[in-house]
């Protein structure tokens, strides 16, 4: 072929290294594998050899278009490779390709691969032996070669797998590639091996680089992901804290919305602020909405609350929520309500001047018993109802009133009418008070300023006798039905005035009333209601501006102002205390001082004495010894002077079950055993069988002593107990496996103790106790063995005064005399590690307890504060809240219930219980508030889709 012809061929397109022709008899996959081997042999992976394959299919019809494509492939190829076999020898396509090649190319560029059949060279004839050869076409190949051609035996290659694994393939492929490249076979094989090695190294390096890049990209992605999550978490924390702040600002004015915001704040992020707000949420007022204008509210001795409005009366059980347990909807306005002393009768005063009596023995099914005639002739509405201890019912209107005999509740009978201006009746029914204004130019008694009160004694036949006249408060609030009130014991009289004062009178001798110091409020338009607590130690005054002011009047000569309850936007026209005195019900009434849209609501305020409280219950236990819960959290032993046992299972209000009289003059601490069936106390150690907690049975009686233990701790695993008698006295370790005969095992040398400074680890292996030098020593304890020292915690700055182990066995919390708490890691008792500290108390810490969940702790101190701590990160103790408990609790002790539901605080002023179960608090908040509206959501969470937390 001329050079011009060759250039013309190459100029037409791609030039192939070889054209491979094979018949259908050779497996197509084998041919592909062989092609791949040829392409990659002695070539970099990124520059494969260019090959053209043509497979003869027997069913291919002759076509000028097909041959044109084959001819183009042949024209662009430098070599022809014929895969010789009988079917190829008979194939017209293979024969035509050979004829074309021998016509346009040299036989020197024709290579033969022997895949099947017979192939024999006859050296004498310088040609194939055509009598034996059947793998090549005789007509085309008879005169093609001047000498024996090169061919490669591929008959062994029958499957693609052989092309990948059989080492013979390299030899065969080298035979083909050698003429293509002009190199010897040995040189090719060596180059191929080196090239494969280089390629492998290059690929490995590439993979390493790509892997590094992938790892860097992954690390960058993880970092970005973490940063994004951190940013999101920080945003949620910020939003949670903002919602807590918003809720705190409206907790009294819009308590229902505040509850929803608190739940959502905790839902976004359980921050220390959110947790503190949940625990403190019990102090928020609960709201009962009226069905019109509210008129009055009253508590029964059994805890039911009656709310009167223009549509009748509804009964509520506040312990179960703010949904009524029954409704008496007669469409007759009820203007006054009162319960009988035993709580079984409910009197309803109407706008028509009549009184109805209902049997409310079953509060869910009130039953009408009877109705009186009109109390006064002109059908004036009833403003006040009072059940007396003598079995009468006093009904008051602004024009007078009447004594009703209700011995037969189905037929109330009037005994005597009351004079105009009657404003109050004593609980016993032996006194009534009337109020009258002084006429123009009329001179009253000394001290009278525009009005006077007259006290009347009531005889057994309901006859009146004037016994005294006193000055009334200035300012006309006579239209307010509850502006004058007798104390429950009948010893005091309170009078609210239009000048914002409350006048107090001591009427122990009704004939000689004695004025007590006036109570001054910040009222702008006058006071409309006053009420005494059941024990007569607290006075509540309802203001025209919607505020309720509490006063401590336990010492009438030195009354002390207490909390101001601000929330109503209307005048407070009615007040009432719950039977236990721990709740104040305030009634908002509509009048000319209406300051908002708060018409028709009753607010229930949690109080302790004259202060607000977030405690769920106040129990009359005496003593500051540490409280102890039974393992099932159903019982609580507290006080110590004497020890009282309470049922606190949460199904009903706490109930006193038993009282254990002290056997030491100074009282004694008590603690439940691990089974919950035994209550231990000391010193000396004694035990009570508590299977029937209402009837405890002493198991190990002993002599009465003058000392006793001020700290007693029971091992949670082993039958051991530690007892401390007080400062300067060594701690004793007792074996309590025998409840009837506890045995002293030994004392802790150089130990010291105060009231809540002994703590066993949850696994029972360690006991922590203060040392006489102010530090803390860890002791290893075991049954039937004396305690041995395990390690010491150095004095961190102040003498240790309270100790508590965390539930993880390795965290010990230490409170000291400087008001500091310190967290220690005591995983290795001989090498304790200090983790974190915080100082919030002023003075010594007297009480310390770990929450069973491990994240919360509670402390009490001589400063009277009860503080909650978040110890999720022991290295950073964070104060959650300072609990409002109705005053201060100096020298108090604390304890959590094992079920994580309650926190008990024992102090000189009694025992307080806080609910700390977050799930339970969240359920209560949702039950006490309607779902947040879409508009409210947009106001406080505009960047988040509407998703109510209590849906």
Image (cartoon, grey):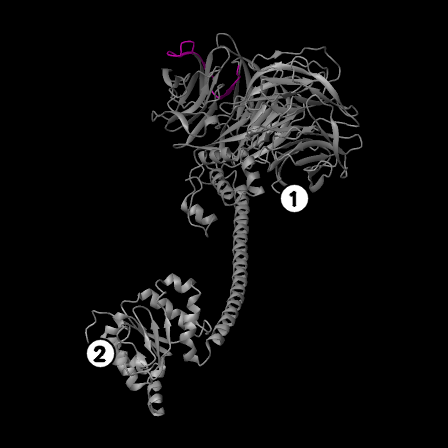
The stretch drawn in magenta includes residue 930: no
Q: Secondary structure at mark 1?
A: loop
Looking at the picture, tell me which residue is in the foreground, 16 or 904.
16
- Is 169 drawn above or below residue 143 in the view shown? above
The stretch drawn in magenta includes residue 416: yes
Q: Which residue is mark 2?
A: 65
Percent of width and height locating residue 816: 73, 35
Looking at the picture, tell me which residue is in the foreground, 509 or 448.
509
Residue shown at the point (72%, 11%) measured from the top left? 704
Tell me the quarter of the image containing the C terminus.
top left
The earlier-in-sequence mark between 1 and 2 is: 2
Question: Which quarter of the figure has residue 820?
Answer: top right
Looking at the picture, tell me which residue is in the foreground, 615 or 371.
615
- Is 60 drawn above or below residue 943 in the view shown? below
The mark found on residue 666 in the picture is none
Tell me the quarter of the image containing the N terminus.
bottom left
The mark found on residue 876 in the picture is 1
Tell me the crowding category of disc 1: few under 14, some 14 to 19, or many 20 or more residues within 10 angstroms, Cα based: some
**Horizontal side of residue 362 vs 117, given as left or right:** right
Looking at the picture, tell me which residue is in the foreground, 559 or 830.
830
Magenta part of the protein: which range? Answer: 406-427
């Amino acid at each position: 072929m001329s050079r011009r012809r060759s250039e013309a061929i190459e100029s037409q397109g791609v030039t192939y290294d070889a054209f491979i022709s094979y018949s259908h008899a050779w497996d197509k996959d084998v041919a592909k594998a062989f092609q791949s081997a040829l392409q990659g042999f002695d070539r970099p992976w990124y520059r494969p050899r260019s090959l053209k394959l043509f497979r003869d299919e027997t069913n291919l019809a002759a076509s000028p278009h097909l041959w044109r494509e084959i001819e183009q492939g042949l024209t662009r190829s430098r070599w022809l490779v014929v895969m010789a076999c009988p079917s190829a020898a008979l194939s017209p396509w293979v024969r035509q390709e050979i004829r074309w090649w021998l016509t346009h190319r040299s036989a020197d560029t024709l290579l033969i691969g022997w895949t099947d059949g017979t192939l024999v060279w006859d050296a004498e004839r310088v040609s194939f032996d055509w009598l034996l050869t059947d793998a090549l076409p005789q007509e085309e190949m008879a005169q093609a070669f001047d000498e024996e051609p090169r061919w490669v035996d591929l008959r062994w290659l029958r499957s693609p797998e052989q092309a990948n694994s059989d080492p013979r393939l390299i030899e065969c492929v080298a035979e083909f590639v050698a003429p293509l490249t002009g190199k010897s076979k040995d040189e090719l094989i060596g180059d191929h091996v080196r090239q494969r090695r280089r390629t492998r190294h290059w690929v490995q390096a590439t993979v390493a680089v790509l892997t590094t890049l992938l790892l860097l990209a992954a690390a960058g992605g993880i970092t970005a992901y973490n940063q994004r999550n951190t940013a999101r978490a920080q945003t949620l924390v910020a939003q949670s804290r903002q919602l807590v702040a918003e809720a705190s600002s409206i907790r009294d004015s819009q308590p229902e919305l505040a509850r929803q915001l608190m739940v959502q704040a905790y839902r976004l992020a359980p921050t220390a602020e959110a947790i503190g707000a949940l625990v403190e949420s019990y102090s928020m007022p609960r709201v009962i909405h009226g069905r019109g204008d509210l008129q009055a509210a009253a508590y029964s001795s059994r805890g039911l609350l009656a709310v009167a409005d223009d549509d009748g009366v509804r009964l509520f059980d506040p312990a179960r929520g703010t949904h009524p347990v029954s409704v008496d909807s007669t469409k007759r306005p009820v203007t006054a309500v009162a319960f009988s002393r035993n709580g079984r009768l409910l009197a309803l005063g109407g706008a028509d001047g009549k009184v109805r009596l209902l049997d409310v023995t079953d509060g869910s099914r009130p039953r009408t018993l009877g109705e009186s005639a009109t109390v006064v002739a002109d059908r004036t509405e009833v403003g006040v109802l009072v059940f007396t201890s003598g079995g009468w019912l006093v009904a008051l209107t602004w024009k007078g009133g009447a004594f009703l005999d209700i011995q037969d509740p189905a037929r109330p009978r009037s005994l005597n009418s009351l004079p105009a201006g009657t404003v109050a009746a004593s609980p016993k029914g032996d006194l009534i008070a009337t109020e009258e204004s002084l006429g123009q130019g009329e001179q009253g008694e000394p001290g009278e300023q525009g009005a006077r009160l007259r006290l009347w004694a009531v005889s057994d036949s309901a006859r009146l006798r004037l016994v005294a006249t006193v000055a009334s408060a200035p300012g006309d609030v006579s239209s307010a039905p509850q502006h004058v009130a007798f104390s429950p014991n009948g010893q005091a009289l309170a009078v609210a005035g239009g000048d914002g004062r409350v006048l107090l009178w001591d009427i122990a001798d009704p004939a000689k009333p004695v004025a007590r110091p006036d109570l001054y409020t910040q009222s702008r338009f006058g006071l409309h209601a006053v009420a005494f607590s059941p024990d007569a130690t607290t006075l509540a005054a309802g203001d025209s501006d919607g505020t309720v002011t509490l006063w401590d009047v336990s010492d009438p000569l030195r009354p002390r102002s207490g909390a101001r309850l601000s929330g109503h936007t209307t005048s407070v026209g009615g007040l009432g205390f719950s039977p236990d005195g721990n709740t104040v019900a305030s009634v908002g009434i509509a009048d000319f001082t209406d300051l908002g849209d708060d018409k028709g609501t009753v607010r229930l305020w949690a109080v302790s004495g004259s202060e607000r409280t977030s405690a769920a219950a106040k129990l009359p236990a005496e003593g500051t010894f540490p409280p102890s819960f039974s393992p099932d959290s159903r019982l609580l032993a507290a006080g110590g002077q004497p020890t009282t046992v309470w049922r606190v299972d949460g199904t009903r209000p706490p109930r006193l079950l038993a009282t254990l009289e002290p056997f030491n003059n100074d009282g004694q601490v008590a603690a439940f055993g691990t089974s919950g069936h035994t209550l231990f106390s000391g010193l000396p150690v004694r035990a009570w069988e508590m299977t029937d907690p209402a009837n405890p049975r002493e198991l190990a009686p002993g002599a009465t002593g003058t000392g006793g233990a001020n700290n007693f701790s029971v091992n949670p695993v082993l039958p051991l107990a530690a007892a401390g008698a007080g400062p300067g006295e060594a701690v004793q370790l007792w074996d309590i496996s025998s409840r009837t005969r506890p045995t002293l095992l030994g004392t802790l040398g150089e130990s010291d103790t105060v009231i809540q400074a002994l703590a066993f680890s949850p696994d029972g292996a360690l006991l922590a106790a203060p040392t006489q030098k102010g530090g803390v020593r860890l002791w290893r304890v075991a049954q039937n063995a004396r305690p041995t020292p395990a390690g010491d915690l150095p004095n961190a700055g102040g003498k240790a005064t309270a100790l508590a182990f965390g539930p993880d066995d390795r965290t010990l919390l230490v409170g000291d005399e400087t008001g500091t708490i310190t967290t220690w890691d005591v995983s290795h008792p001989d090498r304790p590690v200090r983790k974190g500290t915080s100082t919030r108390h002023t003075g010594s810490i007297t009480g310390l307890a770990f929450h069973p969940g491990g994240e919360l702790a509670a402390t009490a101190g001589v400063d009277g504060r009860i503080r909650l701590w978040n110890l999720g990160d022991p290295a950073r103790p964070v104060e959650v809240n300072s609990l409002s408990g109705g005053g201060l609790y100096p020298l108090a002790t604390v304890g959590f219930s094992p079920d994580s539901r309650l926190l008990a605080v024992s102090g000189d002023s009694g025992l307080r219980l806080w609910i700390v179960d977050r799930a339970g608090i969240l359920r209560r908040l949702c039950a006490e508030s309607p779902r947040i509206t879409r508009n409210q959501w947009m106001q406080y969470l505009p960047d988040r889709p509407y998703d109510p937390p209590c849906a």
